[in-house]
């Protein structure tokens, strides 16, 4: 096991990694921007190094500063968390070249899965079902329109280097196609520096279901079942649960096996998530693979009783997976609500000073957060301030527990999405499990 790990991140995920390290007897080094000096991850790390000013590009995305901090602190490994540099293949390669173990997959796999076109083609070879679409990126709008006509409308236009809902447009007919294509292309250039676009069949009213996978880098792999991530707004997840109510035991088994086969074929190392669109007939189609730990990993931890962050550390340190697929069972049901510093009606960010902060407790209740009474929610970074996770013996109990926990959660001084989560939990469609990626638009406008 490593002696000292640098966490190249901030907020609740930095705290989560610090806790996992400390339980394994591993020293930690936090990094922070000058405005993050009063953050909890700085206080809880064994050491902390300032890496630059507030802007992410000058601090948490500053590769030179992070590597310098790692060298100064004499660490063995670097954990990127999620976001920032977590899926940056160049950063992973630089870490390894500088003698630091990158706690994640290889640069090659990050690069392969970071481009949606190449990821789709790779998954096809491994027998993973994919949404019908273009073979790689399209040449131009004329080529794109031809492909769209051949597969039939509606179609989804996507940036090859996309993520987080950026560079995505749906075209329902030929008239709207060219405008949607140009908008997606423009957004792709602005957001990702690449104008590569690909086309795929639009699956109407789908569910977003993802499978948590792990590999040891030598051809062994495991899955930790699936998460239901259909409650979204603007392609950003709001609430996740595990397991999914949308799939049968047969589909669950097949989805897990297909996902693990891909991990084994790739000789993938460490944590990953394979995301699928699932239609009403339980057909599932590969969407993308995230080569990092996910924000919503706690719901998987709750139902499998597995510390996924510690497993990341053990795999990166060469200890292997340490378990077999038959050892991993589903127990009960878990739900996670992402609490953002946003107006619950407009979803506009609401940074500011927290003047009162009381987190819920009780059996089966967990809060992952870096906030405290008096904490200033900064406008420079992601607006998520906490993750509220509950566990129940079944979905009904988990919903009841989450409703109770949301009532207890107090965040004064700023607006949050807690009220939106209360509305979701009360909605009859959610309670009945009648959800899709269109849930928020359909029921809350």
Image (cartoon, rainbow, N blue to C red):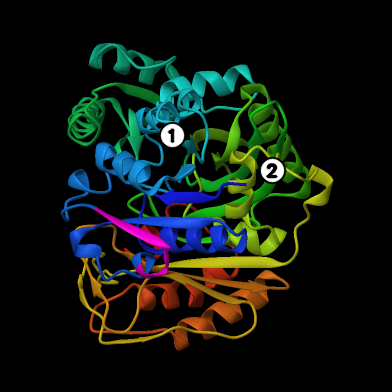
Q: Quadrant of residue 284?
A: top right
- Tell me the residue at 51%/38% (across/down): 104
Could you tell me which quadrant the C terminus lies in? bottom left
Name the residue carrying label 1: 202
Q: Which mark is residue 230?
A: none
User: Which of 25/54 is in front?
Assistant: 25
Q: Residues within 10 Å of mark 1 (few under 14, many from 20)?
A: many
Residue 322, placed above or below residue 381: above
- Tell me the residue at 52%/81% (across/down): 403
- Tell me the residue at 59%/75% (across/down): 399
Residue 82, placed above or below residue 263: below
User: Is 258 a magenta residue?
Assistant: no
Q: Residue furthest right?
A: 326
Name the element at disc 2. strand
- Tell me the residue at 29%/41% (across/down): 68
Magenta residues (range):
43-50
Q: Position of residue 384 (x, y in %)?
A: 34, 64
Cα–Cα gap, marks 2 and 1:
27 Å
Name the residue carrying label 2: 223
Q: Position of residue 288 (x, y in %)?
A: 48, 34
Name the element at disc 1. loop
Judge left or right: residue 441 versus residue 316.
left
Residue 193, placed above or below residue 344: above
């Amino acid at each position: 096991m490593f002696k000292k790990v640098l966490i190249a991140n901030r907020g609740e995920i930095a705290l989560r990694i610090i806790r996992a390290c400390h339980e394994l007897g591993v020293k930690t080094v936090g990094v922070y921007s000058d405005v993050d000096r009063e953050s909890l991850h700085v206080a809880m790390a064994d050491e902390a190094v300032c890496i630059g000013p507030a802007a992410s590009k000058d601090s948490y995305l500053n590769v030179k500063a992070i590597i310098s901090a790692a060298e100064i602190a004499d660490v063995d490994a670097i954990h990127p968390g999620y976001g920032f540099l977590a899926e940056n293949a160049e950063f992973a390669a630089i870490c390894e070249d500088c003698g630091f173990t990158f706690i994640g997959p290889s640069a090659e796999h990050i690069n392969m899965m970071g481009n949606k076109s190449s990821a789709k083609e790779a998954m096809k070879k491994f027998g993973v079902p994919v949404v019908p679409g273009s073979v790689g990126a399209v040449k131009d709008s004329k080529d794109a329109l031809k492909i769209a006509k051949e597969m039939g409308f509606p179609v989804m236009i996507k940036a090859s280097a996309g993520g987080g809902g950026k560079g995505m447009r749906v075209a329902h007919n030929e008239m709207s196609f060219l405008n949607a294509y140009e908008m997606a292309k423009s957004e792709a250039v602005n957001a990702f520096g690449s104008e590569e676009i690909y086309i795929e069949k639009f699956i109407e009213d789908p569910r977003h279901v993802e499978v948590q996978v792990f590999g040891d880098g030598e051809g062994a792999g495991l899955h930790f079942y699936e998460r239901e991530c259909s409650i979204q707004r603007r392609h950003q997840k709001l609430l996740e649960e595990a397991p999914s109510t949308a799939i049968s035991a047969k589909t669950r088994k097949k989805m897990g096996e297909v996902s693990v086969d891909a991990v084994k074929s790739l000789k993938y190392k460490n944590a990953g998530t394979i995301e699928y669109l699932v239609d009403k007939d339980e057909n599932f189609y590969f969407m993308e693979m995230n080569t990092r730990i996910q924000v919503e990993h706690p719901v998987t931890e709750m139902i499998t009783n597995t510390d996924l962050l510690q497993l990341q550390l053990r795999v990166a340190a060469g200890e292997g997976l340490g378990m077999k697929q038959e050892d991993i069972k589903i127990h009960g049901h878990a739900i996670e609500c992402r609490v953002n510093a946003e107006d619950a009606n407009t979803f506009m960010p609401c940074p500011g000073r927290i003047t009162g902060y009381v987190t819920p407790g009780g059996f089966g209740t967990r809060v992952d957060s870096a906030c405290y009474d008096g904490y200033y929610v900064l406008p420079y970074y992601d607006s998520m301030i906490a993750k509220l996770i509950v566990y129940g013996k079944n979905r009904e109990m988990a919903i009841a527990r989450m409703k109770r926990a949301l009532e207890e959660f107090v965040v004064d001084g700023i607006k949050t999405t807690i009220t939106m989560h209360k509305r979701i939990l009360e909605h009859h469609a959610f309670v009945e499990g009648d959800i899709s990626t269109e849930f928020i638009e359909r029921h809350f406008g």
